[in-house]
Amino acid sequence: MDTAVKLTLGPVERANRITVKVEEYRDEKGEATWPHSQFAADVLRASFIISLVGGMIRVWASLLASPDFDMVRLKNEIGKCKKPYNNLHVNLVDKPAECEDPILSEAQFYAKAVFDLQHRRHLARELRRVTGVDPQISRKRASLHLGGSS
């Protein structure tokens, strides 16, 4: 059954990846913006995969109306028509009662067709990152996983 909206929770960003990002922020923004970890906004991630435009509008309106979150940043990649993302990135602050400090997270909004394509690209990129793997094996696995043939 096809649903209009699907929520997926991403894994917590790996510590080594956060370290790389913080170093990049230091180089990009300069020492005056310390602590550079303040710019790491996608440690906790979720994606809304939306089949219909009406679903995106409903989810967006619900998120804006929610007393549980404050939206602190929006990156409209759909409006820029830039590949490969073509989605919305929203950074949210959640203030759960059981936590002393607020939690910054990222939610991404995708059209289902764009999400499916990006997911396949991500898998191919992860296969290329594997070291010590015969390139022919990597191409074959990517081809099989992406639905191609070789």
Image: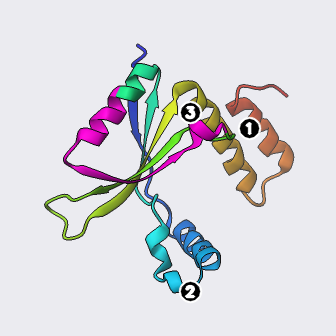
Q: Residue at x 40, y 56 (%)?
A: 44
Question: Could you tell me which secondary element the residue under label 3 belongs to?
Answer: helix
Q: Amino acid at mark 2?
A: Glu
Residue at figure coordinates x 86%, y 43% from the top left: 136
Q: Quadrant of the C terminus?
A: top right
* Position of the N terminus by quadrant: top left
Q: Residue at x 45, y 61 (%)?
A: 41
Give the amino acid type for the residue marked by disc 1 in the picture.
Answer: Ala
Point out the stretch of residues depicted in magenta.
58-81
What label does residue 115 carry, if any? 3
Task: Please tell me in which quadrant of the rendered image residue 140 appears.
Answer: top right
Q: Residues within 10 Å of mark 1 (few under 14, many from 20)?
A: many
Alpha carbons under labels 1 and 3: distance apart? 17 Å
Residue 142: mark in rendering: 1
Position of residue 107 measured from the top left corner of the image (x, y, whole percent): 42, 46
Q: Are marks 1 and 2 in contact (CB under 8 Å)?
A: no
- Magenta stretch contains residue 119: no
Residue 31 has which mark?
2
Q: Residue furthest front?
A: 79
Residue 5: give x, y in percent of width and height.
Answer: 39, 26
- Quadrant for residue 27, please give it: bottom right
| Circle 1 or circle 3, nearest the eye | 3
Q: Is residue 140 visible?
A: yes
User: Does the image show residue 86?
Assistant: no
Task: Name the side, left or right, on which 99 lies relative to 27.
Answer: left
Q: Is residue 39 above or below residue 80?
A: below
- Residue 66, given in percent of the width and then of the height, sits at 22, 42
